[in-house]
Image: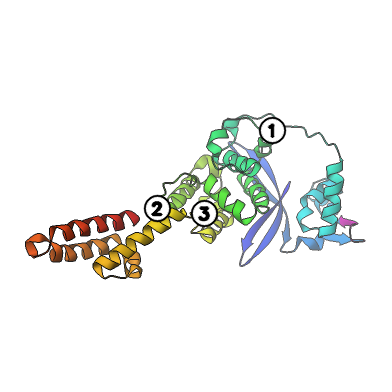
């Protein structure tokens, strides 16, 4: 049993769900609609004493659930002081968790990558993807809907810079060439995301559109909220500035115009200037060579 959220018109709707196995995949079903304010199900007797009032409703639906289980499910909706006490109490307990036996073949590689990056903060999860880690058993016997809610909850705790590293690692953007443009990086991100949305083993019976609308939209928000985040080294900026100034002095075209110009526009400018500086047109050989060098450098930047 788990709590799922769904983005709806600027807010979230929450549902109590459970995963069940229906060959060949684990699927999910709604047990109870919690609405937009699950906090309404919590009754406080003091700042830290409370009860979650859905036991009877769940029992009528055939689910026997105790307050300890409900406390875990509704933890995020509790007030900060109640959360602090629960964390303090839980940490003081020496609870031995019974681990599930699993095979890496039973878990999708993208889920393994996400969990490894969340656990270790590495930028190259592919290096560790074939290793067995005890916490990967948390990814077993869950529907795609439950898995996405599971990862969403963990990602909520990431700080801004951690999110940058997380997105670049899970979508294979960590080792892109420094010469790649932002458009190139955007394209790789979207291609990798779309590949997952067309992977039947990843979807586990869910519709691609449903995954995109309810869950993967968060990755698109996270990614484009952080663009551009591939910061160029300082020496690269200095080198580019020198090239633009050199071009300005030679061509009389401002750096702002050259920066905004596309490759096609630059080539058009080069052809026009080539006619002017070509030795056969009354120009000098030295100036024509200099013109070629400048445009080669400008095209490298582009």
Q: Is residue 98 left or right of residue 11?
A: right
Mark 2, residue position:
184
Q: CA distance from mark 3 to mark 1?
A: 32 Å
> Which stretch appears magenta?
46-51
**Is residue 66 in view?**
no
Residue 97 quadrant: top right
Mark found first going from the N terminus, 2 or 1? 1
Q: Nearer the viewer, mark 3 or mark 1?
A: 1
Mark 1, residue position:
134
Q: Is residue 101 left or right of residue 271?
A: right
Quadrant of the image containing the C terminus = bottom left
Q: Mark 2 Cα within 10 Å, few/some/many (few <14, many 20+)?
A: few
Mark found first going from the N terminus, 2 or 3? 2
Residue 52 quadrant: bottom right
Residue 144 quadrant: top right
Tell me what residue is drawn at x 59 percent, y 31 percent: 104
Q: CA distance from mark 2 to mark 3?
A: 25 Å
48 inside magenta stretch: yes
Q: CA distance from mark 2 to mark 1?
A: 37 Å
Badge 1 marks a residue whose secondary structure is: helix
Q: Position of residue 277 (x, y in %)?
A: 15, 63
Nearest the viewer among 31 and 252 is: 252
Mark 3, residue position:
209
Badge 3 marks a residue whose secondary structure is: helix
Q: Is residue 145 left or right of residue 180?
A: right
123 inside magenta stretch: no
Tell me what residue is drawn at x 60 percent, y 30 percent: 131
> Magenta residues: mostly which secondary structure?
loop
Nearest the viewer among 79 and 35 is: 79
Nearest the viewer among 282 and 186 is: 282
Q: Position of residue 9 (x, y in %)?
A: 61, 67
């Amino acid at each position: 049993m788990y709590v799922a959220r769904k983005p709806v018109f600027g807010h979230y709707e929450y549902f109590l769900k459970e995963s069940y196995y229906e060959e060949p995949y684990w699927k999910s079903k709604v047990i109870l609609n919690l609405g937009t304010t699950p906090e309404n199900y919590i009754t406080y007797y003091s700042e830290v004493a409370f009860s979650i009032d859905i036991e009877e409703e769940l029992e009528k639906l055939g689910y026997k659930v105790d307050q300890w289980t409900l406390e875990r499910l509704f933890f995020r909706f509790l007030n900060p002081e109640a959360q602090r006490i629960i964390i303090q109490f839980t940490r003081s307990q020496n609870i031995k968790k019974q681990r599930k036996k699993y095979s890496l073949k039973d878990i999708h590689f993208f889920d393994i990558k996400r969990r490894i990056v969340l656990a270790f903060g590495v930028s190259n999860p592919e290096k560790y993807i074939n290793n067995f880690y005890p916490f990967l058993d948390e990814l077993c016997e869950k529907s795609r809907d439950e898995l996405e809610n599971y990862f969403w909850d963990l990602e909520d705790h990431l700080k801004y810079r951690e999110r940058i590293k997380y997105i670049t690692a899970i979508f294979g953007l960590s080792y892109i060439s420094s010469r790649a443009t932002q458009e190139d990086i955007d394209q790789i991100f979207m291609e990798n995301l779309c590949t997952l949305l067309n992977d039947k083993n990843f979807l586990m019976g869910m519709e691609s559109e449903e995954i995109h609308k309810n869950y993967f939209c968060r990755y698109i928000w996270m990614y484009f909220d952080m663009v551009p985040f591939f910061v160029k080294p300082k020496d690269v900026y200095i080198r580019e500035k020198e090239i633009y100034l050199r071009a300005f002095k030679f061509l009389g075209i401002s750096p702002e115009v050259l920066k905004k110009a596309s490759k096609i526009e630059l080539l058009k400018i080069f052809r026009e200037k080539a006619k002017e500086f070509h030795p056969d047109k009354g120009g000098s050989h030295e100036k024509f060579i200099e013109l070629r060098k400048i445009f080669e450098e400008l095209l490298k930047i582009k």
